[in-house]
Amino acid sequence: MSNRATNLLVPIVSVILGLLVGAVIMLASGYNPLEGYAALWNGIFGDMYTIGETIRQITPYLLAGLAVAFAFRSGLFNIGVEGQLIVGWFAAAYVGVAVELPKIIHLPLAIIAAAVAGALWGFVPGLLKAKFHVHEVIVTIMMNYIALHVTNALIRTVSDGGDRTESIFASASLRSEFLENLTEFSRLHLGIVIALLMVGVMWFILEKTTLGFELKAVGFNQNASQYAGMNVNKNIILAMVISGAFAGLGGAMEALGTFEYVSSKGGFTGIGFDGIAVALLGMNTPLGVIFGATLFGSLKYGALNMPNAAGIPIEIVEIVIAVIIFFVASGYIIRLLLLRASAKKKEAK
Amino acid sequence: MEYVIEMLNIRKEFGTFVANDNITLQLQKGEIHALLGENGAGKSTLMNVLFGLYQPEGGEIRVRGKKVDIANPNVANDLGIGMVHQHFMLVENFSVTENIILGSEPTKYGITNKKDAAKKVQALSEQYGLNVDPYAIIEDISVGMQQRVEILKTLYRGAEILIFDEPTASLTPQEITELIQIMKRLIAEGKSIILITHKLKEIMDVSDRVTVIRKGQGIGTVITSETNPNDLASLMVGRQVEFTTVKGQAFPGEEVLDIKDLVVQDYRGIDKVKSLNLNVRKGEIVGIAGIDGNGQSELIEAITGLRKVKSGTIFVNGKDVTNMKPRKVTETGVGHIPQDRHKHGLVLDFPVGHNISLQTYYTKPISKSGIIDYNKINEKALQIIKDFDVRTQGPSELARSLSGGNQQKAIIGREVDRNPDLLIAALPTRGLDVGAIEFIHSRLIEQRDNGKAVLLISFELDEVMNVSDRIAVIHDGEIVDIVTPETTTEQELGLLMAGHTGHKDTQDLTKKGEDQHVE
């Protein structure tokens, strides 16, 4: 089997296997898998509204995936995307609420505030890693908790003890009448443009700049990078800052697009953690992140329709979705099985 | 003649690549049979076939005249085949005995019986004159001693046929002499040995017969006493090879590198370089001879800015570079072929082209205002690949998939192409075959002839003697003597490296050393 054929076949076989095992789980729990998958399909592509909502759901996954992937390419494991996204969310919403400015200033300002907040949240673990060799995984996990509770406290302060801020001024909103009309008034907003732009930015940094060259070199081999005169510490910090900025932008999508406010949270949003899976599914490449985010966003949003339309309890739905993603992620195993099968065929000949 | 092992017309393929093609090797009982070939010629593949790690696509293996199918290393063990690996397979913080019994621990009532095992190890050690303490911890004993543990491991498991894979690669000259004694003792006790190597001198010293393979093809078997290093080298490489590197007289000019009272510490804070003084002039090659671990690494790292200098000064071209950042040192005109090409020399997961531009990626014409032109990187790579004969599929092949020699050529190309005033070459030919060594030596001499200063660090006395114009012997962080290759001998160097100073008493010792050699 040629390499290209294998590359094409692996994801297809993975998805089919995932769907099959998911079907077995639904059958075993006494539900009709055909109805279930029909509901899933309609939940994703049913009409213009669901398509719009699906794309809206994909948007923050794109940015969270980029954040994780960018750090990975520099040899860092940024588990703190969740926290960086939360502070970005708050920062964007705060700027959106606190002042009223002309849109041309207000919207960019709110977006930049989110990126800066996320970058700052990434800077701390980067600095600790570079200067004191504290492992970034530990620091970023702890920074997640700090982000969650600090923003909750800030939200209460800002909203005089309330659970959520006011809605942002229209001048800071990413909502677009055009997109809403196009998608039967879904919450699809202009954030998807920003997210796709950032995919391009990540690609450009990694593939076209000397900075990207250094970041990748440091990610692969710190000793050789140091030997070649690169400033390893600077690159580690920079990688975390840029990664954090992507995550912060993910928060801005929620603050300025989907919700137009920020509310205090009982727990994590999960988007940042799912970003790890998105990045890994996409092999940490910019284009791969689009694939991973699309898969995650679609399944997550489409799944919401399964309890309503097919009467499958949400717990089973989540298991089925997890199984599908699991199989896609196990591409390596599928590849191995395919290779074995083709090797056997050869022997038989 | 009785053969203990016969590998007849062995063929091994990896996909479309033929690693072994029609190779025949017949090992007589009680002989040391050398297996000679360049890096990547297929020596290790052949031995892995014999050891059961690979299954051959063609040919047959006979052990003591009987056809066998060696499906895995356990079968090889049962047939009495043992392998002493180049990279030792030892658990560092286990004792000698624990390492030897690992995998086949003798038990008494379900509890490991180390005492009996230690006794057995002791007995074997005495029988073969290995002088190993069964209770010593691996990390406390020397590399030479660790190798003996590997030998014991195979003997303990009842090996009759021992395969030595590049056994001298990491040994000091003294340890090599001892190893040769041990091999002869093993033969005297009735064992048979296959010695994998590309060092011709060793082959001439110890082997009875030599089987040569070249690019996966069996070239033939010759009797050592009827051949000479020159013939062997041309058999191996397929063309005439120059041995003593041809080089004209040196015309040293002004000082390029000047080191004064240098003190450098290792990561534990122990002085590894102690008040070292050294200078290298334009148009000369200064070789640093010494046993591994006498401060060579720390010295190079200090010069190149990779390690902090505690005290003393380093001047390059009259400029103080003490404690400068690596990039600043590089830009002052220093090229550095690092000791460990995988750790420092290359980003293995980067393409060859990226690696060739590893020192220049940020400069014009490759980069302009922070944007890299990858076409320029490829252009440069193609030029270096051509000029330095780097065998690769092209600039976009990963550095990891190149053979050691070609990786090294890429590094040397990168460093020499920048035309540095001072070229530091640390173990530039480690693990390479004669063809590549010849090439690298001639490049170093070419740099010298172009009026550049070259500092060569090597553990190989041959190399130091052949290439250097002056030899600085390092021992315990100090330059103990500076000699010229014309007026010194390997024996004298060996003693200086071991810390014997003063020329008078060296002569007696030298003599003694020679006597031992004759034994």
Image (cartoon, rainbow, N blue to C red):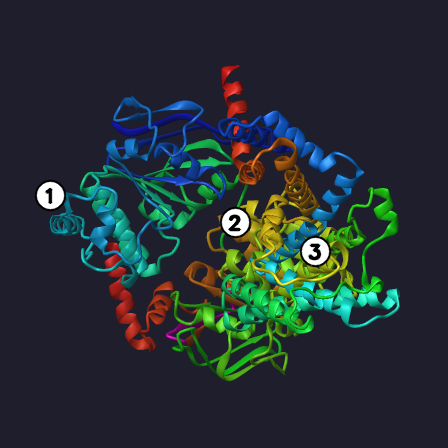
**Discs 1 and 3 carry the same chain letter:** no
**Where on the picture, by quarter, is residue B28?**
top left
Callout 3 amino acid: Leu
The chain that hosts pointer 3 is: A
Q: Nearer the viewer, mark 2 or mark 3?
A: 3
The reply to whether callout 1 and callout 3 are in contact (CB within 8 Å) is: no
Crowding at mark 1 (Cα within 10 Å: few <14, some 14-19, many 20+): few
Region of the chain picked out in magenta, as a range: B468-477
**Amino acid type of disc 1?**
Tyr
SS at circle 2: helix
Chain ID of residue with mark 1? B
Judge left or right: residue B487 versus residue A150. Answer: left
Would you say residue A162 is visible in this rendering?
yes
The rendered magenta stretch, by its main secondary structure, is classed as strand
Q: Please give the label number shown on residue B109.
A: 1
Nearest the viewer among A64 and A238 is A64
Q: Quadrant of the N terminus of chain A?
A: top right
Question: Gap between marks 1 and 3, in whole Å?
Answer: 61 Å
B167 up-or-down from A234: above or below: above
Q: Is residue B448 visible?
A: no
Determine if the magenta segment contains residue B382. Answer: no
Query: How far is disc 1 from disc 2 in space, using C-alphas?
Result: 49 Å
Query: Could you say which quadrant of the image residue B332 lies in?
Result: bottom right
Mark 3 crowd level (few <14, some 14–19, many ≥20, 10 Å Cα): many
